[in-house]
Amino acid sequence: MRHPILFALALLASLPSFAQQQTVTSVAGDRRVSVTLTFSGQELFLHGQTPPGTRSVVAVMEGPGAGGVRLMEKGRVALFWMGVRQYRLIGVPGLYLVDASCPECNGMRACPHGSEIEAANKVFALHGFVVGKDDISARAELEGLSGALAAGELTRIVDGFWTLQSGRGLYGVHQNTIRINPEGKFYHRLTLPTEAPEGRYSVTTYFLAADRLLATETSELFVRKSGLVAWLSRLAERRAFLYGILCVGIAIAAGWLAGTLFKRGGGH
Amino acid sequence: MILVSNLDPRTRMGDVMRPSRSNRIGLFFFLAFLAGIFLVARATPAPATRGKVPAPLAGVHAALACTECHGADAEAVGNPTGPVSRADVVGRCGRCHATALATFKESHHATGPAAAEGLTPTCVSCHGSHTIVRNAETASPVSAGRVPLTCSRCHEDPSLLRHTDLPYSAVEGFEHTFHGVALAHGITDVATCATCHGAHDVLPASDPRSRVNPANLERTCATCHKAVTAEMLAKVRHPDGPVEKVSFLSRLRLYFPVAGAAVNPLLISGLGALVGFLSGLFGVGGGFLMTPLLIFIGIPAAVAAATDAAQITAGATSGALSHSRLGNVDFKMGLVIVAGGWAGGFVGVQLVKVLRNLGNFDFFLKLVYVLVLGFIGSTMFLEGLRAWRGRSGSSEPGRGRLTLFFSRLPLQVEFPKCGLRTSAILPFAAGFLVGVLAAFLGVGGGFIMLPTMIYIIGIPTRVAVGTDLFQIVLTSANVSLQQAITNHTVDLLLAVTLFAGSVIGAQFGVLASKRLRGEQIRLFLAIIVLVVMAILLYQLLMPPTHLIDFARTGGGH
């Protein structure tokens, strides 16, 4: 009976990637992203005019967080790997994507600099905030579900959490992704992954001169389920019992139907 | 005329000269008619001079004399082969623009099949005629901002596209790309049609000389982007374009509302078929296989486990129906076991709640799981192997002392399909134990139940498979209902996509079970149980990819 398993593995391997064609939506033009049956992520186009004297631009998109996230730390006990500690990370956003420009490469070549965020953070620090992983660490609150917390544990847990979220495309810092054109217009794209949570998003754009913050702009957008997707998930949330009965009913009906069809079709 | 016809013989002469009221209206229309004819005649030029009235020459050619392009013979201008006619205009512009002419002559616009039909553009189609301005000026139809519009005049015209094999939505597709959206917002330093496809030298992508031929694409992108990444190349796509050669089926995606993930529905159905097959063959739910597979392809763990219960309900219904037709389902036995299973499940869930608060409980569960699976798997494997080799005897395992002990307890019930007469306490207790275990392990427990039915209760293998399927229908229906109510984690769309495969797979499983002998089924099940055990053991022993991971809250509470 290993053939079906091989078949399933072959099926898995035959998939080139989960990336699907995405269209670009302009945040300035449309502040709604509809999650429909064909949704497979969305590229957002962000653009605007930089104020005079702008040297670089940093944009931060944040998505809604869901209260707290339960995390566990694995460790080796005797021969086995097991969850040794559990934590709850509170106050972290559901999506955190940072784009930054590189004044030298300007979005058109592989950027060897990669320190634009650090430079920007020095300016931001004067205003009492930072951008990137340190921002998450600064905002997050860690609660130990098994025993007291040791010093420095927060940074380690946030590091691990960042890695998990980056893998899903929900967190990330991307340098040299914003281009400022000769007319002083800046533009870039941010990819909203499939797993992007439903809710209100904000995009904050910072315009920087060499050593100071020139201006800040914030825009908002909504990621909302719509159509059948919205109907089904609302039903599952609000009319749970009805939804459960519907699921079981459809399951039994489907099984019954298949059994009946096969009896007639099989001719035995 | 009108006046005359209106003459009344009885009217006096003086009256004749004064038109009546109706005559006055008639006269008005007659005069209006005459005036209309006069005006139309004035507006229409004499046939000898008919033709377009030229706009005053402006732009880069403002200093040129008309005769430079049109020739001295004004009469020849309307002629199909005369000056600036379609046949002539390219050569005429080329007298000054020799390089452009040489390039254009090689292009698809000049040599393609549509060119022979006179459907392709010439110089004036893109650049205009009397008011040609420099390309860099925004007013130029070939300026960066206006190129897509200019190209679209032919490439989106259905009456033209009908005659050619051009992509139908190339320009529309471009408008949805990053470059297209930027352009729509007045950002003109992005690539447009001509940047990638060329202007005078435009060629189909299939031509090796084309800039958008897959072999040249990287170089074309590199004219702007100094570093071209594989990701960038993957994103260069035009609807209908040949760049991304991925089949439609593998690109199919469906967004599952509750799971919040977009996955290929064919993959989901394929997994459903696989698990359905096993379910029909062995009478197991298949949750032990399906849940990890769903998590592997990106469905959140909680949704995977809950939805799995719904799909098992469908698969098991289909399988149980077929088995009941073959006379393999003992309903009475099934109900007693289910009663035990539900009681056990209830007790198990409460126990889990208490134990989870004590500490690292999940790990020990996994360990218990491995031990239980290892024991059941290897026992069944050895027994099945022995039975397969010594074919002569009964194909069913013998009844042990436990079976004999229970056959003497009170509440004796006849189970005719199983060919058993035993105490109802036995199947109830077996169901109870499996229920507790299933609640602990977070799975349906079908593959623990089946060996219990065969070896402890003593039900013949095939009836055990059918009866187990029947009790799985009831148990998993209950679990999916509970999950939907408590955790809101059942994804109906995902479940339906899984059914599509599993109900069919289950039918094949039942057919296969008819072909196989009891001990063969037991042997194969033993192998699968051992494989699952090996995977679990491997997970326990190997270092995990992420030391910090999302904590999975167990289902069933």
Image: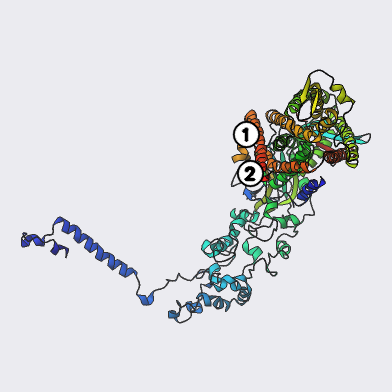
How far apart are labels 2 and 1 at the CA level? 15 Å
Quick one: SS at disc 1?
A: helix
Kindly identify the amino acid type of the residue bearing the numbered disc 1: Arg
Quick one: SS at disc 2?
A: loop
The quadrant of the image that shows the C terminus of chain A is top right
Q: Position of residue A104 (x, y in %)?
A: 74, 55
Kindly identify the amino acid type of the residue bearing the numbered disc 2: Leu
Q: Is residue B134 left or right of residue B231?
A: left
Name the colouring of the figure.
rainbow
Residue B83 vs B516, above or below: the answer is below
Residue A7 vs B382, above or below: the answer is below
CB of mark 2 within 8 Å of CB of mark 1? Answer: no
Which residue reaches farthest top?
B410
The quadrant of the image that shows the N terminus of chain A is top right
For the question of whether residue A88 can be seen, the reply is yes
- Residue corresponding to mark 2: A37
Which residue reaches farthest front?
B392
Q: Position of residue A235 (x, y in %)?
A: 62, 33
Depth check, front residue: A44 or A71: A71
Q: Position of residue A157 (x, y in %)?
A: 82, 36
Q: Position of residue A90 (x, y in %)?
A: 75, 31
Depth check, front residue: B320 or A176: B320
Q: Quadrant of residue B95?
A: bottom right
Q: Quadrant of residue B375?
A: top right
Which residue reaches farthest bottom?
B72
Which residue reaches farthest right?
A78
Q: Is residue A7 left or right of residue B132?
A: right
For the question of whether residue A122 can be seen, the reply is no
Residue B291 vs B185, above or below: the answer is above
Image point (60%, 55%), residue name: B175
- Residue corresponding to mark 1: A234
Which chain does the residue under circle 1 lie in?
A
